[in-house]
């Protein structure tokens, strides 16, 4: 049986903050500069919302028919090649349906139902699920998170953010390597900074600028091409937070998030 990912648990006292060990992504206490946060074009978001509202339903209906018919034929088919072809048809139809679902969720996301969320507990919850995925057996996650650190977040959506960023880093690492997580409280602006880092394929300046744009088609093969990063950006901004990417040649790629620690006006985006 393959070894599961190494879940390296390092607990630090809240007063000590996040250590800047070379084994973890370093973190300073300055706020994320506004000009480094590359948001999707508002006009394109509006167009996406209109598409999702009108075309999503129309596309899902025939997809449901294709999926159902492929599953029905698969039950009685004995030829291995035909079974493989039917399974592929069904899988690709599901993929299209999932993509449409992502578009609709991105364009018209539900407002977060926020509460005090303990970052360390949610991280452990996500890692427990992560460790059961056979595709992640060669990924190790090292983390340092103060055990009393909290953010003001929708717990389900917070889990989605962690999961999607882990998935993106794992893809960049080619399925083997180390993902590093660090968190600290930024006292001067009452926020928590959370960093997820890897040494996989990085981003060019152009790719970084459009990383959260669902319409951008120039991403390299090493990073996720779907809606993962777009969903992360959407959720973080809906919570009144910030997200940006630090990436320099030969160094770690860092996803840097800042979350409010208490109730505040959420970043509601009306389209």
Image: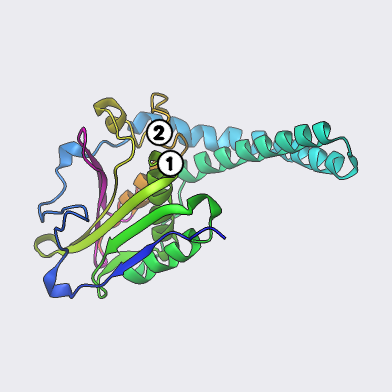
The quarter holding residue 259 reads bottom left
Residue 236 to residue 6: above or below: above
| Residue 117 visible (yes or no) | no
Residue 63 or residue 49, whichever sits in front: 63
Q: Are marks 2 and 1 in contact (CB under 8 Å)?
A: yes
Residue at 48% x, 54% y is 137
Reading the image, the residue beneath label 1 is 171
Element type at mark 1: helix
Q: Is residue 70 left or right of residue 94?
A: right
Q: Is residue 102 left or right of residue 233?
A: right
Q: Position of residue 171 (x, y in %)?
A: 43, 41
Q: Position of residue 219 (x, y in %)?
A: 38, 28
Q: Position of residue 144 (x, y in %)?
A: 25, 64
Q: Is residue 216 left or right of residue 75?
A: left
Residue 207 or residue 100, whichever sits in front: 207
Residue 219 or residue 241, whichever sits in front: 219
Q: Is residue 88 left or right of residue 209?
A: right
Residue at 37% x, 45% y is 169
Colouring method of the image: rainbow
Q: CA distance from mark 2 to mark 1?
A: 6 Å
Viewport quadrant of the N terminus:
bottom right
Element type at mark 2: loop
Reading the image, the residue beneath label 2 is 222
Q: Does residue 135 belong to the magenta stretch?
A: no
Crowd class of label 2 (few under 14; some 14 to 19; many from 20; radius 10 Å) = some
Residue at 41% x, 52% y is 139
Quick one: label 2 or label 1, which is nearer the N terminus? Answer: 1
Residue 37 to residue 128: above or below: above
Residue at 9% x, 62% y is 188
Q: Read off the magenta span.
A: 239-263
């Amino acid at each position: 049986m393959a070894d599961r990912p190494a879940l390296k648990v390092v607990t630090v006292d809240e007063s000590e903050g996040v250590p800047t060990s070379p084994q973890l992504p370093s973190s300073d206490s300055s706020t994320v500069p506004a000009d480094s946060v590359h948001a999707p074009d508002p006009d394109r978001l509006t167009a996406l919302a209109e598409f999702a509202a009108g075309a999503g339903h129309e596309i899902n209906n025939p997809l449901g028919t294709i999926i159902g018919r492929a599953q029905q034929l698969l039950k009685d088919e004995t030829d291995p090649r035909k079974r493989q072809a039917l399974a592929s048809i069904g899988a690709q139809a599901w993929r299209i349906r999932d993509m449409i679902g992502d578009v609709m969720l991105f364009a018209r996301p539900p407002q977060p139902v926020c509460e005090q969320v303990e970052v360390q507990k949610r991280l452990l919850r996500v890692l427990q699920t992560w460790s059961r995925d056979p595709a992640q057996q060669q990924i190790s996650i090292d983390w340092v998170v103060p055990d009393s650190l909290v953010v003001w977040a929708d717990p389900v959506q917070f889990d989605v953010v962690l999961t999607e960023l882990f998935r993106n880093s794992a893809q960049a690492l080619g399925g083997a390597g180390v993902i590093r997580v660090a968190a600290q409280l930024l006292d001067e602006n009452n926020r928590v900074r959370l960093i997820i880092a890897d040494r996989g394929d990085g981003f060019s300046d152009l790719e970084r600028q459009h990383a959260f744009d669902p319409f951008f088609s120039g991403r390299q093969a090493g990073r996720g091409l779907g809606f993962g990063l777009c969903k992360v950006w959407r959720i973080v901004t809906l919570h009144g937070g910030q997200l940006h990417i630090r990436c320099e040649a030969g160094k770690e790629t860092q996803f840097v998030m800042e979350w409010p620690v208490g109730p505040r006006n959420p970043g509601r985006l009306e389209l």
